[in-house]
Image (tube, rainbow, N blue to C red):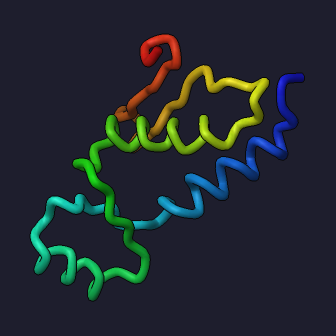
Amino acid sequence: MVIDFSDLKKLVNQHVVDLFDHSVVISSRASQPDIERVEQMFEKFYVVDYQPTCENLVIDMADRIRTQLPAHVSLFSLRLVETATSYAEWFAADNQ
């Protein structure tokens, strides 16, 4: 065993799921009135410094997870699923 699944699940929940689940994600490049409108309309929102596409979100999530893993553990891959047929994948081998 490389890492206990409960430890990995806790890490992912804390640094990814709790932050992004049921959140509206908006780019900081959006206009201030747009950001203010989102703030008024939604209880949970998150502003990122990139265009929040599935591809960019999976990169951000991979970075968040990698920085929290124990030194002897490395992230191999990550898949972010939007719908049954739409997803983005991140592979460590492609990002070295």
For the view shown, which residue lies furthest in the front direction?
71
Q: How many marks?
A: 0
Q: Is residue 73 above or below residue 15?
A: above
User: At x 22% / y 62%, what residue is drawn?
Assistant: 28
User: At x 20% / y 75%, what residue is drawn?
Assistant: 35
For the view shown, which residue lies furthest in the top direction?
93
User: At x 54% / y 44%, what residue is drawn?
Assistant: 64
In front: 71, or 30? Answer: 71
Q: Quadrant of residue 66?
A: top right
> x%, y% of residue 50?
26, 49
Q: Quadrant of residue 87?
A: top left
> x%, y% of residue 42?
34, 80
Q: Quadrant of residue 39?
A: bottom left
37 with respect to 62 (left or right): left
33 with respect to 57 (left or right): left
> x%, y% of residue 51?
22, 48
Q: Is residue 5 above or below residue 29?
A: above
Q: Is residue 14 above or below residue 55?
A: below
User: At x 50% / y 32%, what residue is drawn?
Assistant: 79
50 with respect to 44 (left or right): left
Q: Quadrant of the N terminus?
A: top right
73 with respect to 79 (left or right): right
